[in-house]
Image: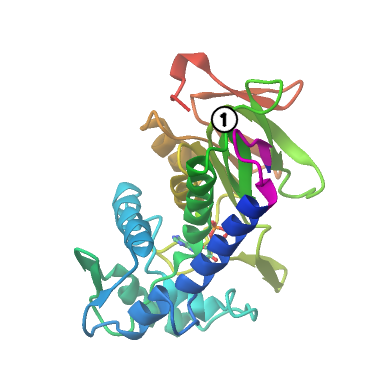
Amino acid sequence: MVSDAGEVKDIATAVNEVFDQLTELDSLWSESGPSGDIFKLNSNAGGSAYKVDKRTYSLLNRGIILQELTDGAFNQLLGPVTDLWGFHSGNPHLPNQWEIAQSLPLVKGNLIFTDNDCIISEKGMKIDIGGIGKGYSVDLAVENLISRGMKSGIIEAGGDLRTFGNPPDSDNWRIGIRHPRNLEEFYGVLEIGEGSVATSGDYQQFFESNGKRYHHIIDPKTGYPAKSCVSATVLTKTCLDADAVATAVFVMGPDKGIEWLDRFDEFEGLIIYYENNGELTHNISRGLNFDPETSIITLNSLYNSGE
Ligand code: ADP
Ligand code: MG
């Protein structure tokens, strides 16, 4: 949504071009499209280096940094394990535990870059950018609109979003955080200026087997869905970072996840989880304030993180 197009006269054309860009990124980063970078890198695992598009380079390089920063809770090389769960192929199912055990060592390998040449260190390793690709696409779309002179708006892709400028008649955007069990309702409403918000939840993609919920956010240490959170929402400057860190703190859990967010001025977040007594509750980072009367979440001025 564009709320102030600045000097741009033909908004429809500009927006259509942004959609074209998103379609191009989809095929560049598709796991199965043979002309795309991710497909080529995965097919070349353990082989020769391949020169990637500079956007792929920025994406994967930031992924390497986020992987280190989150101590591996975010892992963009989870492909061998996520393939076994089948969420991307549309046929999610419980994998055999031996298969998981066999594929786990593969997620600990490396992506190696020399300039834009990239190589996956070992055969069998596989990139899965499911945890960051969407966020970075939003960043590129926002940059595109700003470079055309647009002044304010909001771009959202599947629950991850980035705002730029101010909304009409207000300093703050109001972002609803979905209630993870009553999907028609909001758990809270976040009021922010410019920034990005991403949510990872156990309700987005899951299946049930023997009464247990298996979802698509995988703990790279175990190869199984991360257990202790229901949803994790992260606020930071770029949508790429918000997307990856939401996935990472979901994996870390409600206590360690918030501890991690509180180590950085530039990340804030809310983690929803079940208490032992079965009640849904949340932990919140110190830079945010949740008003229990109104469920409005605002940036705490003490820790204003510069968004
Ligand atoms: P969504 O894409 O539904 O918004 P996420 O941003 O949490 O949700 O991304 C989940 C996707 O990221 C999974 O489908 C998978 O492709 C990938 N993924 C799962 N677990 C991890 C992880 N620990 N680190 C990085 N990527 C992950
Ligand atoms: Mg994510």
Q: Which residue is mark 1?
A: 165
The x, y position of residue 79, in whole percent, is 43, 74
Q: Is residue 224 visible?
A: yes
Residue 255 to residue 126: above or below = above
Number of numbered labels in the structure image = 1
Give how far across and how far down residue 201 sits, in percent.
62, 53
Query: From where the camera sits, is residue 158 visible?
Result: no
Question: Bounds of the magenta span?
Answer: 2-12
Q: Is residue 20 left or right of residue 304?
A: right
**In the image, is residue 175 above or below residue 240?**
above
Magenta stretch contains residue 11:
yes
Is 97 located above or below residue 65 in the figure?
below
Q: Where does the image place residue 124, in percent across and percent down from the top left?
A: 33, 84
The residue under the point 50% across, 48% down is: 144
- Quick one: label 1, few (<14), some, or many (20+) residues within 10 Å? some
**Does the magenta-highlighted stretch encompass residue 292?**
no
**Which residue: 53% across, 58% down?**
134
Question: Could you tell whether 102 is left or right of 137 in the image?
Answer: left
Snapshot colouring: rainbow
Asked if the residue at label 1 sits under 8 Å from ligand 1, the reply is no
User: Which residue appears at 46% of the width and 20% of the height?
Assistant: 304
Q: Nearer the viewer, residue 296 or 236?
A: 236
Mark 1 belongs to which amino acid? Gly
Q: Residue furthest left?
A: 114
Which SS class for mark 1?
A: loop
The picture places residue 8, in percent across and down from the top left corner, at 61, 40
